[in-house]
Image (cartoon, rainbow, N blue to C red):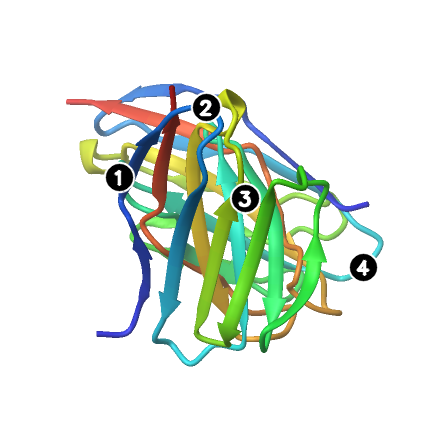
């Protein structure tokens, strides 16, 4: 099956803890993304990678750090989570180029208590 | 920078009625325009895309025309069904690359039987 896979589906943690999310795509794409989706369904891009290289780094707190081991994998680590980090984190991938659509994973829902 | 403005939701309709979700965009370039749909518990998925002005995209009874003069890309469906209940996103990416696509805020559609 070719798709974008994310783990875990859900994560509940307490303020100050560290969390990590994983994303893998089997579509053969070169570009991968992390988005944050808030409770109002607003999609905000956080990072874009092309062939393991960071291309876009939006204004994101420094406690967020992405990592890509190869073009098919993109992880996100959050050090010392805060309540405002509660959201759905969506991973996506696409072919490189302006006319290509993005393929999204199902998301990881993070709840910070 | 680029921007996309779309109808604020929620939009509530009865089955069998028609739908229009307005989408206007601003960019200095010649973008590809997209409509994505997100069903509960899933990531957004492409509904259709249109790369050229004055062309129409369509899928599952939904359609939109790329109007370059009016900078609009309104989503329409003649007769909605309960299964169309979802969040709809209008988006654009510039021809120079898709590392930072621009999404609208999303429009939640609720269709009652």
Residues beneath discs 2 and 1 located on the same chain? no
Circle 4 SS class: loop
Crowd band around label 2 with a 10 angstrom C-alpha radius: few (<14), some (14–19), many (20+): some
Between tags 4 and 2, which lies in front?
A: 2
Residue beneath disc 3: B90
Q: Earlier in the sequence, mark 4 or mark 3?
A: 4
Residue at the spot 35% in from the left edge and 43% down from the top edge = A108
Q: Chain of mark 3?
A: B
Residue beneath disc 4: B29
Circle 3 SS class: strand
Crowd band around label 3 with a 10 angstrom C-alpha radius: few (<14), some (14–19), many (20+): many
Q: Quadrant of the N terminus of chain B?
A: top right
- Asked if residue B53 can be seen in this view, the reply is yes
Residue B41: assigned label: 1
Q: Quadrant of the C terminus of chain B?
A: top left
Question: How far across and how far down the image is residue A39, in percent?
Answer: 44, 24
Residue A15: assigned label: 2
Residue A105: assigned label: none
Quadrant location of residue B96? Answer: bottom right
| In this picture, residue B46 sits left or right of residue B67 | left
* In the rendered image, the vertical position of residue A36 relative to residue A53, given as above or below: above
Q: CA distance from mark 1 to mark 3?
A: 19 Å
| In this picture, residue B66 sits left or right of residue B84 | right
Q: CA distance from mark 4 to mark 2?
A: 43 Å
Is residue A63 or residue A96 the one in the foreground?
A: A63
Crowd band around label 1 with a 10 angstrom C-alpha radius: few (<14), some (14–19), many (20+): few
């Amino acid at each position: 099956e070719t798709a974008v896979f994310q783990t875990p589906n859900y994560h509940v943690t307490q303020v100050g803890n560290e969390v990590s999310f994983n994303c893998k795509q089997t579509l053969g794409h070169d570009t991968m993304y992390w988005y944050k989706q808030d409770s109002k369904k607003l999609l905000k891009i956080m990072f874009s990678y092309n062939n393991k290289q960071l291309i876009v780094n939006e204004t994101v707190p420094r406690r967020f750090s992405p990592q890509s081991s190869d073009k098919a994998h993109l992880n996100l680590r959050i050090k010392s989570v805060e309540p405002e980090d509660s959201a759905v984190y969506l991973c996506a991938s696409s072919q490189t180029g302006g006319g290509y659509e993005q393929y999204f994973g199902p998301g990881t829902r993070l709840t910070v208590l | 920078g680029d921007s996309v403005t779309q109808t604020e939701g929620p939009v509530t309709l009865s089955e069998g009625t028609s739908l229009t979700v307005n989408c206007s965009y601003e960019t200095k370039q010649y973008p590809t325009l997209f409509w994505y749909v997100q069903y509960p518990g899933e990531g957004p998925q492409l509904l259709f895309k249109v790369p050229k002005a004055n062309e129409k995209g369509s899928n599952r009874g939904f359609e939109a025309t790329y109007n370059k003069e009016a900078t609009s890309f309104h989503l329409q469906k003649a007769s909605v069904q309960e299964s169309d209940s979802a969040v709809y996103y209008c988006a654009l990416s510039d021809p120079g690359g898709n590392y930072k696509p621009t999404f609208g805020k999303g429009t939640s559609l609720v269709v009652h039987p």
